[in-house]
């Protein structure tokens, strides 16, 4: 019994330790005091505080927030310690973090009204064995982002799962020094998106049944551009879900059936991945002009809308390209009944001698859709057999972030 008392103390009495806790018809733990206790602990947290979430499914009615540095929130497992926002009546996110050196692990965040987890303007953010899910399936009314660090230096997202986001399941924006590894993303509009960020390694992930698998984007009207992303050793399989993104957003332009998409981003390497059965194309390389709203949105003079120095090599590519949308369906004949493995819109910066689009991937062919001429002369491009002079380096993070 003494060990049980110690365990109660370790769990900070968030839900008590009685084995007699009841659950309601929806499976929620009946504990009216849980939310108040959790809010108080986060408000009173100091650097080094560890807040433990006991096993159980707990209904919350408002957003949680962490503003001080050095806080860890830790549960008993992503399928055991569940914070549900299905009954949320206030707040824009499930959990908002603005403190440095934050860790969230072994917890699920379900059915938030907005983003499940947003980490904004910090350094050293770790998300480990976290599940962010909208349990009612893939709907436009779901929150936009599952795991959403933005303007963060040093990001680690690993061994996590995201389902049902109406924009991107895992989204890292305007950040630096990033590792996204060994996660599963499915049933989102975009599985994983690296946007306007510098220095990212995306590897070991299973990305399936999204509209688009892995996106590396560089968008205008944001304070920093993005470059230097490596996408490798991922399984990008059958991302053929209908696109349920909100109209007018960039992600709504993603063609269902897209494996890896590079849009307007520079210095990107795509290698050693399994790219299979993505029914528009397994790899798409495109400019901002292909998103469909450049004319109405306008482009700032400092923004580079072209993808440059993109290297595709050593991937295992099979299937795909047999059921693209109406825009590309007429081009299947150029690939013998299916679109080629790599689709390129053909837009290039007139100020550069070469865009540095390099494809060295066995028998994989590249379809240049001739976007600048409104697809007047799409053709198989045989002039892209090149390689970068220097490969991108491995991303490293502070040692303290990778222990766990």
Image (cartoon, rainbow, N blue to C red):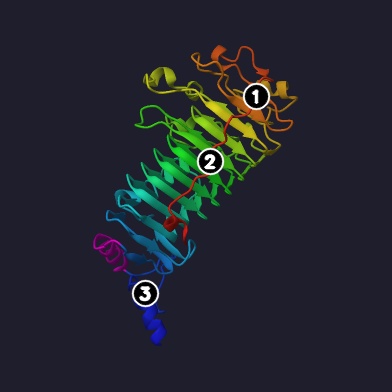
Element carrying mark 2: loop
Q: Choose the circle earlier in sequence order: 1 or 3.
A: 3
Side (left or right) of 154 relative to 70: right
Please name which of the two marks, 3 or 2, marks the residue nearer to the observer: 2
Side (left or right) of 34 relative to 393: left
In the displayed structure, 267 sits above or below 136; it is: above
Question: What span is in magenta?
Answer: 32-47
Please name which of the two marks, 2 or 1, marks the residue nearer to the observer: 2
Q: Which residue is mark 3?
A: 10
Q: Which residue is mark 2?
A: 393
Q: Which residue is mark 1?
A: 329
90 or 311, nearer to the observer: 311
Which part of the image, by quadrant, shows the N terminus? bottom left
Residue 81: x, y in percent? Answer: 44, 64
* Disc 2 crowd, CA 10 A, few/some/many (<14, 14-19, 20+): few
- Residue at x 60%, y 40% (from the top left corner): 239
- Residue at x 49%, y 62% (from the top left corner): 79
In the displayed structure, 351 sits above or below 85; it is: above
In the displayed structure, 23 sits above or below 121; it is: below
Q: Choose the circle earlier in sequence order: 3 or 2.
A: 3
Q: CA distance from mark 2 to mark 1?
A: 38 Å
Q: Choose the circle earlier in sequence order: 2 or 1.
A: 1
Instruction: Kindly indicate whether the residue at mark 2 contacts the one at mark 3 (C-beta within 8 angstroms).
Output: no
- Residue at x 49%, y 27% (from the top left corner): 264
Element carrying mark 1: helix
- The answer to whether residue 40 is magenta is yes
Residue 385: x, y in percent? Answer: 67, 25
């Amino acid at each position: 019994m003494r060990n049980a008392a110690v365990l109660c103390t370790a769990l900070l009495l968030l839900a008590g330790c009685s084995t007699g806790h009841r659950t309601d018809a929806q499976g929620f733990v009946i504990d009216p005091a849980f939310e108040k206790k959790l809010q108080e602990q986060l408000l009173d947290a100091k650097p080094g505080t560890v807040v433990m979430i006991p096993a159980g499914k707990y209904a919350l009615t408002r957003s949680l927030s962490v503003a001080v540095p050095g806080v860890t929130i830790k549960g008993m497992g992503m399928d055991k310690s569940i914070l549900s926002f299905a009954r949320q009546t206030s707040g824009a996110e499930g959990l908002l973090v603005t403190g440095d050196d934050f860790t969230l692990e072994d917890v699920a965040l379900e059915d938030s009204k907005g983003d499940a987890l947003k980490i904004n303007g910090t350094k050293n953010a770790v998300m480990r064995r976290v599940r962010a899910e909208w349990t009612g399936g893939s709907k436009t009314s779901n929150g936009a982002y599952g795991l959403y660090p933005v303007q963060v230096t040093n990001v680690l997202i690993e061994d996590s799962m995201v389902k049902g986001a109406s924009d991107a399941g895992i989204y890292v924006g305007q950040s630096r020094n990033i590792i996204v590894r060994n996660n599963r993303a499915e049933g989102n509009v975009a599985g994983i998106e690296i946007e306007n960020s510098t220095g990212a390694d995306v590897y070991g992930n299973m990305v399936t049944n999204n509209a688009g698998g892995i996106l590396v984007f560089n968008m205008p009207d944001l304070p920093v551009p993005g470059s230097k992303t490596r996408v490798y050793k991922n399984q990008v399989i059958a991302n053929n879900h209908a696109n349920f993104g909100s109209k007018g957003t960039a992600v709504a332009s993603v063609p269902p059936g897209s494996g890896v998409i590079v849009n307007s981003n520079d210095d990107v390497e795509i290698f050693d991945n399994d790219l299979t059965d993505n029914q528009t194309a397994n790899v798409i390389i495109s400019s901002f002009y292909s998103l469909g709203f450049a004319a109405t949105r306008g482009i700032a003079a400092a923004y580079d809308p072209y993808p440059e120095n993109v290297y595709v090599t050593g991937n295992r590519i099979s299937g795909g390209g047999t059921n693209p949308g109406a825009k590309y369906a007429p081009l299947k004949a150029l690939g013998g009944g299916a679109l080629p493995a790599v689709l390129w819109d053909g837009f290039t910066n007139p100020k550069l001698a070469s865009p540095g689009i390099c494809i060295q991937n066995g028998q994989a062919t590249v379809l240049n859709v001739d976007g600048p001429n409104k697809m007047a002369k799409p053709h198989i491009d045989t002039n892209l057999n090149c390689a970068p002079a220097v490969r991108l380096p491995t991303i490293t993070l502070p040692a303290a972030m990778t222990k766990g």
